[in-house]
Image (spheres, rainbow, N blue to C red):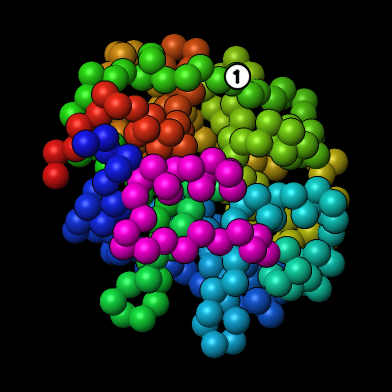
Amino acid sequence: MPITNKTIKELLPLSFNSTPAVSIRKENEVWIATSMLIHYLESFTDSLVVTEENEEPIGVIGGREIIENIFKDPSSNFFDNTTVEQIVDKNLVILSDKTNLGELLTTWKKTRRAFSIIPNSLGGYSAISGRKLLEIGANCITDLTISELPKKEVSTFEKDSTIKDIISLMLEKNTRKLLLKDTNYFISDRLIIQSIAQEFDFFRNVKFLERKFEESFKLEEIKKISKDVNLTDISKSMYAMVHPYVMYQDQVITPWDICMALQSDRIEFLG
């Protein structure tokens, strides 16, 4: 049976509900959500679930919502006087025990967000993210290698780019990470949001978008690999990374790419 026909519960029997979803009330200001996202972006949780007063989920907020909106309003007003409800993405995907992998990936392709929640036994919800699905890849048998994954354009920025240039390029290319041209270093939505909160005090005393990136950020280094490993091995390697991002030759690989590769009929599940 193709792996896409198996349910998420079958593919993650011990851990499908082990990652509690992190929630934020819709009436909270955006600066509170931003402070929380610093700790969760690119983790197994990755995004925040927005709830009503009765804890009923109504949507999701992640790096995309912060980045898009600071591009429109790069001021402290956005963080201090905007509520989470005003920028929430209401396309929150709630899974059931019967949801299979194929259905989940089809939905993610439509929403362009690798994040869903599933009810748990405690009366709340657990998070299913792209990072979480690396566990499925790590428990498979396949001869599919990373050189066979679809090639995509590697998006880069220049040393003299402003933060406005970088965010604009992220939105244009629909990507969360950009490589600094001719280097192994990258910037991400998480790094931008972290600097906004911790170094620039939510724009209260600085014009942020006009700044050069080198004045504002410490970049992170992408993991380079030289061997054309199979999907199982790269999944295991990325699962162990704090912020999974890999380069093989002229190709960059993210958890999203691994998730999409799980649709291959050349994959068998060990469970």
Residue at the (27%, 38%) spot, across then down = 3
Horizontal and vertical percent for residue 156?
A: 65, 23
**Between residues 130 and 237, which one lies in front from this camera angle?**
130
Classify residue 147 as left or right of residue 174. left
Residue at the (79%, 59%) spot, across then down = 203
Q: Secondary structure at mark 1?
A: loop
* Type of the residue with mark 1: Glu
Horizontal and vertical percent for residue 5?
A: 30, 43
Can see residue 218? no
- Give the quadrant of residue 92: bottom right
Q: Which residues are magenta?
A: 88-112
According to the picture, the residue beneath numbered tag 1 turns out to be 153
Judge whether residue 93 is colored magenta.
yes
Quarter of the image for the C terminus: give it. top left
Can see residue 185? yes
Classify residue 98 as left or right of residue 185. left
